[in-house]
Amino acid sequence: MSTIDFGLLLNGVERRAAGAAGSAEAPLRVVLVQGEALRLPRSRTSIRVLAGSAWITQRGEDRVLMAGEAMTAAAGADRAVVSALGAQPLLLEVR
């Protein structure tokens, strides 16, 4: 399984967005397929599943979200890791 560190991907995006009025909290949409995982940055804790199923793990606890469900990850040093569950691609929105 490959894990993508979302914080590294957002490095330049977050800085550009902070310079534009009102766009710093714009949602980002991400597609993951089976075998991929995404480590959320500390600045993005709101997760909404738009399609597919997500397996989310944080602080040793696992949670499954289906399309239409949302959650807020706990703040702190242990960032949430999200992966696609099943063969269908996972489309999620993070804020």
Image: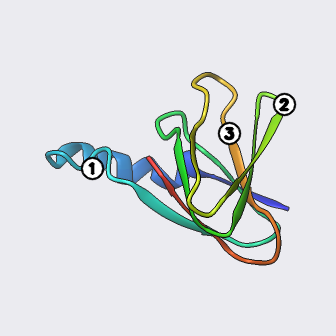
Display colour scheme: rainbow
Q: Nearer the viewer, mark 3 or mark 1?
A: 3
**Of the residues shown, which amino acid type is indicated by label 2?**
Gly
Q: Which residue is drawn at 46% across and 51% down?
A: 10
In this rendering, would 64 be left or right of 40? right
In this rendering, would 78 be left or right of 46? right
Q: Where residue 75 sits in the image (x, y, percent)? A: 57, 25
- Residue extending furthest toward the left: 21
As drawn, the label of residue 60 is 2
Residue 88 appears in which quarter of the rendering? bottom right
Q: Mark 3 — residue?
A: 80
**Of the residues shown, which amino acid type is indicated by label 3?**
Ala
* Element type at mark 1: helix
- Marks 2/3 in contact by CB < 8 Å: the verdict is no
- Marks 2/1 in contact by CB < 8 Å: the verdict is no
Q: Mark 1 — residue?
A: 17
Q: Residues within 10 Å of mark 1 (few under 14, many from 20)?
A: some
* Element type at mark 3: loop
- Pointer 3 or 1: first along the chain: 1
**Of the residues shown, which amino acid type is indicated by label 1?**
Ala
Along the line of sight, the residue nearer the viewer: 48 or 15: 48
Query: Gap between marks 2 and 1, in whole Å?
Result: 32 Å
Along the line of sight, the residue nearer the viewer: 20 or 64: 64
The count of marks equals: 3
Query: Gap between marks 2 and 3, in whole Å?
Result: 10 Å
Q: Where residue 56 sits in the image (x, y, percent)? A: 73, 46
* Vertical arrangement, residue 15 with respect to residue 42, above or below: below
- Pointer 2 or 3: first along the chain: 2
* Vertical arrangement, residue 21 with respect to residue 31, above or below: above
In this rendering, would 6 be left or right of 32? left
Q: Which residue is drawn at 61% across and 22% down?
A: 76
